[in-house]
Amino acid sequence: MNIADDSGRSPVPSTVRKAWPHSDFVQDLAELQRVGPLTHCNSNSVGAALMANVLLAVGASPAMIAAREEVVEFAALASGVLINLASVTEDRADNLLLSAEAAQRAGTPWVFDPVAIGVLKFRTRLAHELLRFKPAVIKGNASEILALAGLDGHAKGVDATVPSVDALASALELARQSGAVIVITGAVDFVTDGRQIIEIPGGHPVMARVTGTGCALGALIAAFLGVSPTPLRAASAAAAVFAVAGEQAGSETTGPGSFVVRFLDLLSQLGGVQAG
Amino acid sequence: MNIADDSGRSPVPSTVRKAWPHSDFVQDLAELQRVGPLTHCNSNSVGAALMANVLLAVGASPAMIAAREEVVEFAALASGVLINLASVTEDRADNLLLSAEAAQRAGTPWVFDPVAIGVLKFRTRLAHELLRFKPAVIKGNASEILALAGLDGHAKGVDATVPSVDALASALELARQSGAVIVITGAVDFVTDGRQIIEIPGGHPVMARVTGTGCALGALIAAFLGVSPTPLRAASAAAAVFAVAGEQAGSETTGPGSFVVRFLDLLSQLGGVQAG
Amino acid sequence: MNIADDSGRSPVPSTVRKAWPHSDFVQDLAELQRVGPLTHCNSNSVGAALMANVLLAVGASPAMIAAREEVVEFAALASGVLINLASVTEDRADNLLLSAEAAQRAGTPWVFDPVAIGVLKFRTRLAHELLRFKPAVIKGNASEILALAGLDGHAKGVDATVPSVDALASALELARQSGAVIVITGAVDFVTDGRQIIEIPGGHPVMARVTGTGCALGALIAAFLGVSPTPLRAASAAAAVFAVAGEQAGSETTGPGSFVVRFLDLLSQLGGVQAG
C-alpha cells in the first residue's frame, strides 16, 4: 500500500516509509521464545483471557496483577507493562496511574492502549494524565489516536469509524511530542517513531468480530518490549505476528469462533516452535 | 409445544399463544446487521467475553463500560442497555442503579437479567430496586422469574430447577404489573407482554453446559432493542437467533467446547452475512 | 515415575507412595455427575470462564459470587468452596477472608489456591492469614508450595521454575502442620495428606500455554469435595480427570486453541455421560 495520495504528494513528506525487515521479525520472535518475557497486563478488559492466551501461545509469560501494592512492586519485576483502559473503573484508574509511575521509575518500558478515549470524558482525562509517565509505545485505532492528539476521532464505542491512514499525520505529531512509538491499527497497521513509518498489511476482517484482539496486540507489544532492541522494533514485531497469523487463520476458517482457535494454534507454531 | 394441560384447559386462557412470524425475524436481523447497534452491557459476568463475542458475531457493537461517571454518560449514547446481576458486588450494584436510572431518563430501553435472584437476599433486594427504573424486557429462567414475582423459585445456584412453562402464569402477571416484556428461558422459551405469548422452541441441552449463554442472550435482546419496533419483537428476535443457531451448532458438535466455536461461526453467518 | 533418588534412598521414607485406585476415580466421578455439586469459586482469575466451563462440562454447578454479603451466605449453601488468589485486589482480599471463615464455620470444605505467592509480599501475607481457616486442600505448583512452606520457590510470575517433585518434602511437612491435603502440580502431580503420596502422571505440556488451567483444577477439586468421601480422594479425582482428559486432548490437537476445545468436549464425555 502506498500512503501518498492520488496527486503523488505524500501527506507526510519528511518521513521515510518502508516495510519492516523480515530478519528483524525472525530475530525478535526467537528472542521472545527464548526469554519468555514477564509481561504485566494492567487491564480490566473483557478480553483479558485472550490477552493472556495470546502471550502464552507466542511464548511470553503474562501476569495480571490487580492489588494496588502488588501493581507497584510488579512494575519493577516485569520486563514490559501494559496499561489498557478497557472497562476502567475509578478505583482501577488509580492503579493504572501508580503502575505507569512505577514503571517509569523502574525503567520498565510500557505500552499505553487508550481504549475508547474520545467517546467518554472520564477516560480522555485519564489518558492525558497517564501520558506524563512516558509510555514507550501508544497503540490505538485511528479514532483513538486522533482523540489522543486532541482531534475528534468520530469513534463509535470502541470501534474506529475512519481508516488507519487518516490518523497518520496526527500519529507523527504525537510521536514527536510524546517521544513514544505510535501504532495505528486498521486494515493496514502503521508504526512510527515520528521519523520512520512502517506499514504492516495483513490480518483479516474477522478479527474485528472477536472481542479483545486489539487489547491482545497491546499486550504482545509489551512482551516484545522486554526483548526487542527498540520500541519501534517491538511494536512492529507484535503487529507483524498479528498480521501474519491473523491473515492465515482468517483464510482457513469460517467465522469468529473457529478463527480464535486457529489463531492461537498458529501463534504457538510461529518460527517452528511448537507449543509445549 | 402446546402449553395447555392434558384436560384441554389452558393455564392462561385470556392470552393468545402463537409462534413468532419468521418475516419479523428476517427483518429485525437485517436491520441489526445494517445498523450495528451500540449496546452497553453492565455486567461482571464470568461470561462477559462470550457476551461481547455473541454481539460482535451477530453484527452489533458491544461496550462494557464500568466507571461510574461513564456508565451514566453511556446510557444516553447506547441504543440499548443490559443490566445483569451475575457476580454483582456492592460497588457494582450502585453502578447498576445509576445506569438503569440514566437509561430511563435518556429514554434508552434496557434489559434486566436478574441472575440467581431468589437464592440470595442481597440481589433479591437489588432486583426490586432496579424494577423502579422500568426495564423494557426482563429475562430469566423459571426460578428467577418466579422469585421476581415473589414466589419460591427453588433455584440451585444460577440454575433453574423447574421447566419454563411453570413460570408462565407468574410471567404474565409480572408483565402486566411492570409493563415489561418477560422472557422465560428453558427447553422452550416463552416471551410475553402480558397479552400475547410467543413460544420459541429450539436450542440444545449443551447450552446449559457453557457458562454465560443465558447472559449473552440478555445482551442480544439489548442489541435488538436498538433496532426492533417493539420490545416484544426485540426479545423474540434474540431468542429466535439463539434457538436456531444453538440447535444447529448443538447438532453438529460433540461437547461444550466445540459447541461454542460453531455457535459463534453460525451467528456470524446468519441471514447470509459473513463475518468481516 | 519413582521419586526415590538414584542412590535408592527415598526423600520421604516414612510415607507410602502409590498410584490412585481407578475404581475410586470411577465412583467419585459418577457421584459428581449424579449430584452436580454446587461449587462456589471465589476468584478474580482471568481464567474464571474456563473454571466455570470445566465445572459445567464435568457436571458440577459453579457459582461465582462476589458481593460481600452474598459470599458469606453462599459458603453455607455450597458443598465446596474455592479461594483463589489470582488477580486479587485489596477489596477482594477481605472477601476471601470472609468466605474462608464462613466456610469453616459452616463446615463447608474449601480449596486454597495460592496463585503466585512468594513473588509478591501482599499475597504471601494474605495466604498465611487464610491458612488459619483450615482449608481441606491446598493446591499449587512447586514454587507456590515451597513459598507457602516458607522457602524460596524461585517463581517467575505465576509459573513454577522447579519440578513438582522438588516440593514434595515441603508438601509433606505442610500437610502435617496444616491438616490439609496438598496437591503439587507439574508434569507429574503429587497429592498427599502427609502419610500417603499419590502420584498422578498425565496431562500435556500444552496445558501450560492455556491461561487458567491450574485455576480450573482448583475449582474441580472444590467440586469433588462435595461428593468424595475424603479430601485426599477429592483432590486425586480432580487431578486424575485433568491428567486423563488433558493427555488425550493434547495428543489429538495441534496448539492451545484447539486443545481447550477438545479438552472441554472430552470432560463432558467422561464416564460415558454426554453433555446435555
Image (cartoon, coloured by chain):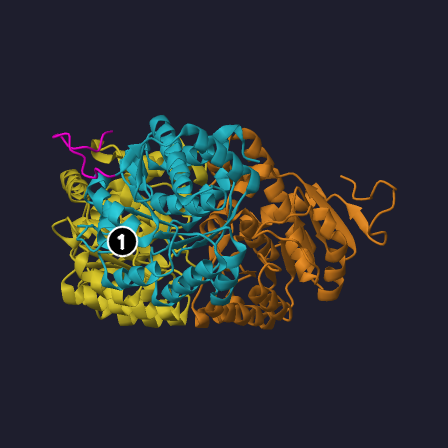
Chain colours: A cyan, B yellow, C orange
Along the line of sight, which residue is nearer the eye, B216 or B125? B216
The answer to whether one can see residue B80 in this image is yes
Magenta residues, as a range?
A1-14
What residue do we see at 31% from left, 71% from top?
B94
Q: Is residue C229 visible?
A: no
| Quadrant of the rendering where the C terminus of chain C is positioned | top left
Q: Position of residue A65 (x, y in %)?
A: 49, 58
Question: Which image quadrant is residue A204 in?
Answer: top left
Q: Which residue bears the numbered disc 1?
A: A116
Amino acid type for the residue under numbered disc 1: Ala
Badge 1: chain ID = A
- For label 1, the SS is loop
Q: Could you tell me how many numbered marks the image carries?
A: 1
Q: Going by the picture, which residue comes out furthest to the front?
A: A14
Q: Position of residue C25 (x, y in %)?
A: 65, 45
Image position of B34 with respect to B195: above or below: above
- Position of residue C113 relative to residue A139, above or below, is below
| Quarter assignment of residue A264 | top left
